[in-house]
Image (cartoon, helix red, strand yellow):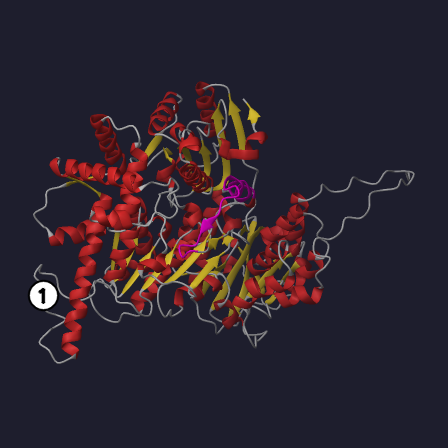
Amino acid sequence: MTTPTSGAPTKVTLRLLEKTDREIIKLDRPIVGAVYKFQHDFRANPRHPGLRLKQLEGHERLYSARVNADYRALLLHLSESEWLLVAVKHRKHVYENLDRLSYGINQVTGSIDYVDLEIVESGMLRKGRPPAAPAASRPAPVAPGPAQERPLFADVTPEQLAELGVAEPLIPVVGRLTTDEELLGLVEYAPRHTGEVLLRLRDAPYEQVLEEVTRPVEVKDVDPQDYQAAVERTDTTVITTDKDLESIIEERDFGRWKVFLHPTQKRLVTRRYSGPARVGGGPGTGKTIVALHRVKHLVDRLGPGHSKQVLLTTFNKNLAADLRARLLALGGPEILARVEIAHVDQLATRVVRESDPGSTKSRIDDTRALNEWRQILLETGETKWDAEFLMDEWTQVILGQAVNSRAGYFKARRAGRGRSITRADRAEIWQLTERFTQRLDEKNLETHRQVAERAARLEIERTARLEAARASEESGGLGNVHAQSATGVWQRYRYRHIVVDEAQDLAAAHWKMLRAMVAPGPDDIFLVGDTHQRIYDNRVTLGSLGVHIRGRSAKLTLSYRTTREILKSALRLLGDERYDDLDGDDETLAGYRSVLYGSEPVVRRTDSFEAELDAITEQIKAWHDICREDIAVCVPTNDMVTQVTARLTRSGIVSTEITADGPRGDEGVHIGTMYRFKGLEYQRMIIAGVQRGLVPRASVEALRRTDPARYEAECKRARSLLFVAATRARDALTIVWHGEPSPLLGDLAAMADSC
């Protein structure tokens, strides 16, 4: 056995291989603490006698070092000053299986593949069939047995597996897989690219996997001995401080993503686009991470300065606060100093106040606005229209198309609105909307939709003045693009780049405003979103609003958050609905998959509300092995939030409500309505109250006869809410209700256990 040459520097760079941190998390806390101390000591001096660093027999680059009396770290020696931590194992498992450890540079991806065949095969055994029973002492009569199961990848040759980039030591193992459970057991411990290839290959032909999974990460002319180049292409984390490893362990995926992006994601982040670009993908595929890295990339290209030339925005107030915290963690205060972070209604309010600083109107939300509509209907005795319909007509058609006259409303398009209306109907509706807006004016109130529409008009007018000034300057006139306007606003575009998270939730007015805030051109607008998660009734076609993304769209398909079992159930909640891609075409989750596996979701039916509360309480108590803050209860109404909170309090379980401003407290189980969980994630999740009359709400059922199109739209929105709620769960999901289940559960309801 040997150690690195004595001329090597004392301090070294230590990297952590992806998946190694996930194995460390599973160790007992005292051992994790020993790993923290080990990495500190190793970075300071790997040759310290107490670490007992030694080369493993039969391996050129693989070394072991002492973590504590029983555990050893396995490290690849990349260069004189650089090491890669690939595993932490009990010492007996290290030395008994040296011939089962394999590593090398993947000749397709150029990254480092580390494979522990003993762990891979034991993982397959745990997930697959039980081991065969010991042979009997006496030969038993041979009975005809079932036909040999056909291998999963019988139609794929070893050469094709190699061309796809499957790790070479695993190719013979892949050829023996016969069940999906065995496949998942292999994927859990295989190199990431190998796992992605095999999961996609299970659902798609070789040629499609080659184009979708392998080609985007393929590297030409790979040097099989250049480990320093290979490690830069490998999902690793450089540990430079004592807090780095702890951050990765505690922050899970975000801790890892702060320093490493999947090659497919990195290409989307660093690409130069000729105009607006969109990245789609299902929950947990890293869309928000891509958006944050895109912001950092754009800031890095700005050059010196202090102005905030990049806007990062989203629809939800909670999400905006979360984006700020994550961007700070990703890039530090230097990046944050160049970025404006605001939710889109906050941005609209700022624009309007610049124009009318003396305005004293109060903003009201949609719930308050809906109540005002109901009051008008009561006062007028109107029964032909319901408040929800009028509210939607006003926001989607009148405000959405900037209609400002009765004649304009007669000409307005109503595609997708469902219920057809006559010219006389339009006259009645226009009269009611005039009465509604007058009522708001009298009460000194305005809705966020009104503010957004006014902000859009102001920004469009501002842009027109800017372009006119520029045209005048170019023609030799006296115009000056830096001259102040009458409102005191400098005549230049507000931002050089705009990045939008959860883009599917923005309304038409928001997009008009954003389009006017940045000059059309390369890298102007970058948006991420998934219309399957659209929980607000904001349906737009971006091309009609000047945001042309056609030809500049990409999709992420690999979920890093939700297990395959939860993902499968969540997709069933979407039913057969069709979803758009924000540009007039259909959006699908074809190819959407996960590299994680776990337990099947628990589906429970109870006979009463009290029994449902009992079931919620029992489930939380059963999850005693994790922090309360990693558990959430999602319900359809605010009343249920109050009732669940009270029940948990009586049971001695601390909880905190999620409000529009985020969790009210720092401790306890998080409880909130479905809308509050957008953009959040938890280890374990309970969705309660999933019953008829609540999901969707009872008033929706009446629309089945009176307005079928609107009924379908409301059911579709409720499906998206359920989908969002279900995919907040990382490891475990429980769905519970009392009485008759929601019709949206479909065949999931048939799986219910009665309690």
Residue in front for this viewpoint, 71 or 167: 167
Residue 427 versus residue 376 in the image, above or below = below
Magenta stretch: includes residue 57: no
In percent of width and height, residue 596 lies at 54, 48
Q: Which residue is mark 1?
A: 484
Residue 282 versus residue 751 in the image, above or below = below
> 164 left or right of 16?
right
> 472 left or right of 19?
left
The quadrant holding residue 373 is top left
In percent of width and height, residue 195 lies at 59, 56
Image quadrant in which the N terminus is located: bottom right
Residue 377 versus residue 94 in the image, above or below = above
Residue in front for this viewpoint, 66 or 18: 18
Residue 427 versus residue 611 in the image, above or below = below
At mark 1, the secondary structure is loop
Magenta stretch: includes residue 583: yes
In percent of width and height, residue 387 lies at 29, 33
Give the farthest residue toward the bottom. Answer: 476
Q: Is residue 45 visible?
A: no
Q: Residue at x 58, y 31 (%)?
A: 751
Amino acid residing under circle 1: Gln
> 159 left or right of 670?
right
Q: Residue at x 46, y 69 (%)?
A: 81
The quadrant holding residue 628 is top left
Residue in front for this viewpoint, 535 or 584: 584
Q: Residue at x 19, y 64 (%)?
A: 463
Highlighted range, magenta: 565-584
